[in-house]
Structure formats: C-alpha cells, structure tokens
Image (tube, grey):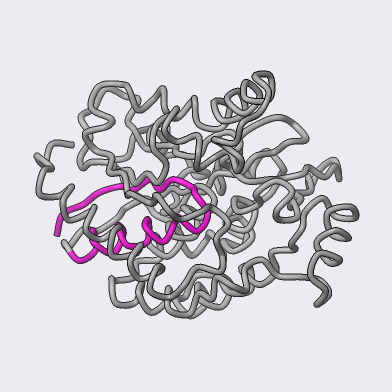
Amino acid sequence: MPDADLVLEGGGVKGLGTAGAVMGLLEAGYRFHRVAGTSVGAVAACFAAAGVDSPTYRDILSRLDLSRVPDRRVPLPLVSEGFSLVARCGAYPGDWIRAFLLRELGDLGVRTFGDLRRDDAGDDPALATPDHRYKLVVMATDVTHGRLLRLPWDYALFGLDPDDQLVADAVRMSLSIPFYFEPCTLKDRGTGESATIVDGGVLSNFAIEIFDRTDGVAPRWPTFGVRLLPDLPAGLGALVPLYGVPMLPAVRLLEQVVATALVGRDQTHLDRPGVRDRTMTVDTEGTAITEFGIRAEKKAGLIERGRATAQGFLQRWDGNP
C-alpha cells in the first residue's frame, strides 16, 4: 500500500473535483498519513484523515446536500441574507454544514482532534512536538491578529488543548468565506479576548509546503497536492465574480491586487523545484465557487473529472518523493 501526505486547495463547490481526486487516490491504494486542507479542501481533508475508503467517501458525498449549505436564519430570501450581513457580518450562518460534519465524522468515530492523534518517530523534529502530531491540519485566518491559523497546531495560541477541540468547528472556521458565511470566533482561555476567524484561503489557499521536511532528511513518501484554480491571470475569473465585465482601470487593478493577495503566496511556492511535479490540477471550469444549486449530473461529472485527474497524474508519477 503506497503512502502519501495530501494537501487540498479551497474553491467552494469546485471542491467536488477535489473529492473525486481523493477517491481516485484511494482507489489506487494510497494511504494518507497526514492531510491538510483549506475551506472546502478542509471538508475533503477531514474525511480522508479519518481513514475512509473510496466507497465510503462516495456515500458521504451522496448525503452532502449542497443546496442546504447556504442556510438561512429565517425562510425569507434576501431579507434573511440582508439581516445576517448587517447583524452578523455574513449572509449565511453555516449551521447546516457544521451539523453535517459533526454527524458524518461522529459516525466514523471522529469527534475531536484527539481522535486524529498520530505518533511517528520518523517525523521531522519540527513537526514532532505534541501540538503537531495530528493526521489533519486545516487553514483558517485570524483577522483580529492578522495571522494564519493551522488548526489544531495553533490552538495553543489561545491557551486551548488541541485534543479537546471539535474537528467540525475547525473545518467550519476554514469554510468562512468573508461576508458569505458568518465568521467564527476563538476565545483565549487566559485573557478572555475573542478573535474573529474567517476562511483560510484569505492567507493560504493551498499550503502545499506544510508537511515538507526542514531537517535535511529525504522524505519517506511524497506530499501530493490537489488544486482547483489555475494560475493567475487565467484564474482571475474563478476568484473575481465580475471578471471580464468592462470597468475602470482602477477597479480592474483592485481585482488583481485582491486576487494576488489570495493566491500569490501559494502560486510563488508552486514554482519551487519539484512542487508542480507532485501537484495535480482538476479542471473545474464552468463551475462557480458558490454554485450550491449545482445539478446532480454536473455534480457527478465534476467528481468523475477529479477521479480522472488523479488517475492520469498517477500514470505520470515517477514515484520519487
């Protein structure tokens, strides 16, 4: 059984392609020691870290009713979104997806990060401390302190024991697309101060380097990456809702600045030697990030596109970590 670590990019509904790619890797017999993800990548990552096989993964996807993800506090379209935006800084509460994650992970025997503990004497010493010994890492953004959070690694910044924190809560934090979903909060146990947490993609949408060794020792297995968004400038259309619509040059520059802030760091790391060789990109063109009303046949097609991407990648993979 081949081994790998796995890093999954965020991208909203495009993440169906990620799920398909993960299924393709599982069908090829891969076993994941550690999995990291951002936003929807965190959703796919938590189930991969829980150790599911491909049929179980597909069953979970069949129960994921995307139309219910943008939930409303009151059953009044536009009124509910407007109220939530003003009162809670997000159009949708995100309660349905959190409940889904709690239920599905619970059925797999995973509730807190303590259920995803791992101990491996061969780990990079930098990742062998107690706060780093987990099968799952999800990215979130602390806008109160202006920093990236790698959960559960960074719960210690808030005086919290990672073993006691709900996996579903961390994934929900990573999913908090600004203004679309209500932001989450983390409270410092020592000071009582609350921090506002939003989508991890604000600072790192594709943390492909997260498990790379820093001690000069050759990796024991590869870290595969699954991307959903093409490089800029081609990827602008996926990040900027009105991309292509004629507008003032200053507004176009603002779009480019925001897009670069979101993906520039990750795209720069991709250009380092060997990184693209271990990264697969699923073609998700034609699917919008917030297309939660996606048709069943289109959903199935996107999943199959992800599976085919993984299968093609493995045919080209030279097996070198």
Image coordinates for residue 193, horizontal then vertical, percent: 85, 42
Image coordinates for residue 293, horizontal then vertical, percent: 56, 69
Q: Nearer the viewer, residue 212 or 128?
A: 212
Image coordinates for residue 95, horizontal then vertical, percent: 70, 69
Q: Is residue 16 above or below residue 268?
A: below
Magenta span: 1-27
Q: Is residue 203 above or below residue 95?
A: above
Q: Nearer the viewer, residue 198 or 262?
A: 262
- 143 left or right of 177? right
Q: How many marks?
A: 0
Looking at the rendered image, the quarter that the C terminus falls into is top left
Image coordinates for residue 201, horizontal then vertical, percent: 56, 41
Q: Is residue 141 above or below residue 166?
A: above
Residue 12 magenta: yes
Q: Residue at 38% x, 51% y: name it.
A: 284
- 130 left or right of 149? left
Looking at the rendered image, the quarter that the N terminus falls into is bottom left
Which quadrant of the structure image shows residue 53?
Answer: bottom left
For this orientation, the residue located farthest to the front is 246
Which quadrant of the structure image shows residue 218?
Answer: top left
- 126 left or right of 320? right
Q: Residue at 55% x, 70% y: name it.
A: 66
Q: Residue at 10% x, 49% y: name it.
A: 315
Residue 131 magenta: no
Q: Is residue 293 above or below residue 143?
A: below
Q: Nearer the viewer, residue 165 or 277?
A: 277
Which quadrant of the structure image shows residue 305?
Answer: bottom left
- 264 left or right of 86? left
Q: Nearer the viewer, residue 163 or 196?
A: 196
